[in-house]
Amino acid sequence: MLRVRDALARADGARADLDRLASLVGEMDELFLLVVVGEYNSGKSTFINALLGDEVFAMGDLPTTRAISILRYGEAAAPEAIGDNMYLYQYPLDLLRDLHIVDTPGTNSIERMEEALTREFVPRADLVLFVTSLLQPLTASELDFLAHIREWGKKVVFIVNGVDRRNSDEQIDRVREYLTREIQTRLGAATPTLYFISALQSLRMKVGSRRGAPGQGSSDASPVAVAEDPRNEYPALERYVLKTLRETERVRLKLLTPLGVLRNLLKRNVAGLDSRLVVVHEDARVLRSIREQLEAYSKEMRTDAERYLLEVRNVLYEMERRGRSWFERTIRIGNVNFLRNRDAVENRFRADVVQDAPQAIEGVVHRMVDWTVQRNLKLWSSVFAELDAHTARLRESGALAPHGDTEFQYNREELFARLREPVERRLGEFDTEREARQIVDSVKEAVTAALGVNVLALGLGGVLVAAFTTAALDVTGVLTATIFAIAGWLIIPARRRKLVAEFEAKIEKLNEDLGALLSTKFEEQLTRYERQLLEVVAPYERFLETERAKLESGLEELRQAEREVAALEQRVVETFPER
């Protein structure tokens, strides 16, 4: 029992079950506990009075037992309150030296607190005497309560009270047949132990017999019942209580009680841990799905990004083709006067070669950024839909039903909220225009820094125009300075070839720098998006891994304990056979 308690604590078992086990450790040292239950007015108190041969407990047509009443050996005295809704009675009956008798409130009482008291006391019982009425045997509330008793695996003896009010002997036989069938069918029990009695008749005869014996006081009276009604099985029931429970039956039941409680707790907690493990596995599956979505997203983004980089390269290659053609047409001796005009050369170079290349590249960059932002928004939307669908599935299957007062339930709800909240917040705050503008500004700053153009106030296209114009000035400046310094017919073709080669090298360098820059900025942004999502998922993944290991270890311990409990129950039954 102590090992089960520790295993449950490690596995984050229900607090109520841990408290029950802690109480049970102390209860094992208590005397045998005989608990009498049933609906009010079924004759529970009258039966106990008959057993005592004295009117110790109040009797009547209305609910008379409004609290748990514990009867033990001692000098008769007024009842003593020993807790909330619990009283201690004492009576000098030898039977009570070996066991305690508990009288409980009616299971169909209008005061639900009273029924709760009865239900909470049943797990402590070593033997349950269930009192029902011959006139109304096994009502719906009684069947419900019997199912509760059965959950704890208690030995139940059924007492049918009121045979003195029968219409005929056949009525007793019909009720016996009915009860046997109902108990076996509805409760899945073996052939029940049934006693048909008249508690009131037996009590009156005992009290009358004792009062008629001179010198007999209530403290030393021998409760020997003489039943005139041949269908009143009270004497047999009393022999069972006075004799059978003094022998091996009491020891057997006393040993089986904690084992029955353990078996019930283990069954319930194994089912609970299994249910929690299902939730953990389902949560982990969803997180794996989110990671797979992220991996697919990243792979697709990196693959499709090449398409935009290729567009940029094509724009520069087309500008390079125009540049070669422009040099061939322009760098000629016949254009000397034109080449001497630096502004004219620059304007012609911009109009004929640069053309709309900066705007085209800027358009590609904007489309690339918009695509990146939209794909990221789609990813977060997909993750949110996955989490919502997962929650709906778990709720529909009942897996999100409370597991009791457990740390698992608290932690999972908190962490799942932490998982879902940032996803929902990210979607709610997602401004695609602002997001795209921030990325474009970042690219513009990087282009400005890489190309050495100090024009941050310009748009990305303006930055590229400045960069291309600077390259053109370098080319034309060298050209005009060389031509007018050397002015030779043979020098111009050679210089033109050199300028073309230099221009091509500059375009190639620009192509490489711009491609690398865009790739770097794209990778930075993609990595930032990946990190944002992983920062949301990672804490819950760590929690699930810890929880999975804890649950699997706990299930292994509890299932081993189940096997040990079953073996111990078998040993008890074999050592103390039922008679």
Image (tube, grey):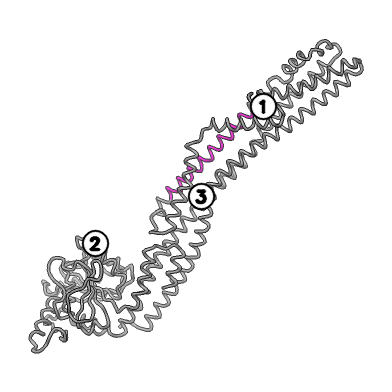
Identify the residue shown where x is 55% and y is 34%: 374
Give neighbour class at mark 1: few <14, some 14-19, many 20+ (Cα, 10 Å): many
Identify the residue shown where x is 70% and y is 33%: 515
Q: Give the residue type that dot 3 points to.
A: Val
Which comes before the other along the chain, label 3 or label 1? Answer: 3
Q: Give the residue furthest to the front.
A: 454
- Is 186 contained in the magenta span? no
Residue at which label 1 appears: 361
Quadrant where the C terminus sits is bottom left
* Element assignment for label 1: helix
Where residue 305 sits in the image (x, y, percent)? 64, 36
* Element assignment for label 2: helix
Q: Is residue 441 left or right of residue 333?
A: left
Q: CA distance from mark 2 to mark 3?
A: 43 Å
Quadrant where the N terminus sits is bottom left
Residue 339 image-quadrant placement: top right
Residue 257 image-quadrant placement: bottom left
Q: Is residue 298 left or right of residue 398?
A: right
Q: Nearer the viewer, residue 213 or 89?
A: 89
Identify the residue shown where x is 27% and y is 80%: 99
Q: Give the residue type that dot 1 points to.
A: Ile
Q: Give the residue type that dot 2 points to.
A: Met
> What residue range appears in magenta?
364-393
Residue at which label 3 appears: 286
575 shown above or below 329: below
